[in-house]
Image (tube, rainbow, N blue to C red):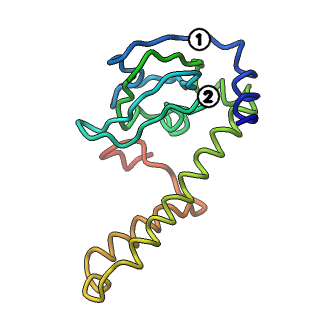
Amino acid sequence: MADVAMFLQGLSTLPLESYQPGDLILRKGQTAGKVFILREGAVEVLDGDERIALASEPGAVFGELGVLLDQPPMADVRVLEPSSFYVAAGRVFLRVHRDAALHVAGILARRLVSAHRNLDQLRRRLTPEQRDGMLEEMVDAVDRSLHWQPGDQPSRGPGDASR
């Protein structure tokens, strides 16, 4: 927790924005170009009506994938209780604030490791019949997609094969 406290202290020169319950800080499909770092409060990440994550830990970051991939957010982020965020212009922020870039890289690395572990657990639970079927093929396809290969380009959106 001391690392997060030091990280947040290093952001103290950034604008601080406050939001109330029900406010959306990011909207699926609408370009934001900003990174939000939770100082205090709680939010939920929604894909349609489905809650895919909750966050209340100071230092939680939102909007980083959209900034890194230069695409709109893939989910809504809605405030659950009065919350404040350090807010920064995306790519400039990650270039200038080295600690922030490392913090985001750590978050993404932990997500990747977690995804691999979850896929491994799922693969171990497959029945013999499922191992020779479409479910195993899907698990394998997702697992392969988590392995970046030289020359891979991130997708910029549905139907955009040119980028």
Classed neighbour count for the residue bearing mark 2: other residues with Cα under 10 Å, few (<14), some (14–19), many (≥20): some
Classed neighbour count for the residue bearing mark 1: other residues with Cα under 10 Å, few (<14), some (14–19), many (≥20): some
Amino acid type of the residue that numbered disc 2 sits on in the rendered structure: Arg
Quadrant assignment, res 7: top right
Residue 1 in the image, given as x and y percentages of width and height? 70, 36
Residue 160 in the image, given as x and y percentages of width and height? 35, 45
Residue 94 in the image, given as x and y percentages of width and height? 67, 30
Q: Nearer the viewer, residue 16 or 93?
A: 16
Which circle, 1 or 2, is nearer the viewer? 1
- Circle 2 residue: 91
Q: Nearer the viewer, residue 153 or 106?
A: 106
Q: Nearer the viewer, residue 79 or 30?
A: 79
Residue 38 in the image, given as x and y percentages of width and height? 55, 25
Taking the spot 42% from the left edge, 42% from the top edge, the residue there is 156
Side of 8 where 32 appears, left or right: left
Q: Residue furthest bottom?
A: 128
- Circle 1 residue: 16
Total marks placed: 2
Taking the spot 75% from the left edge, 34% from the top edge, the residue there is 2
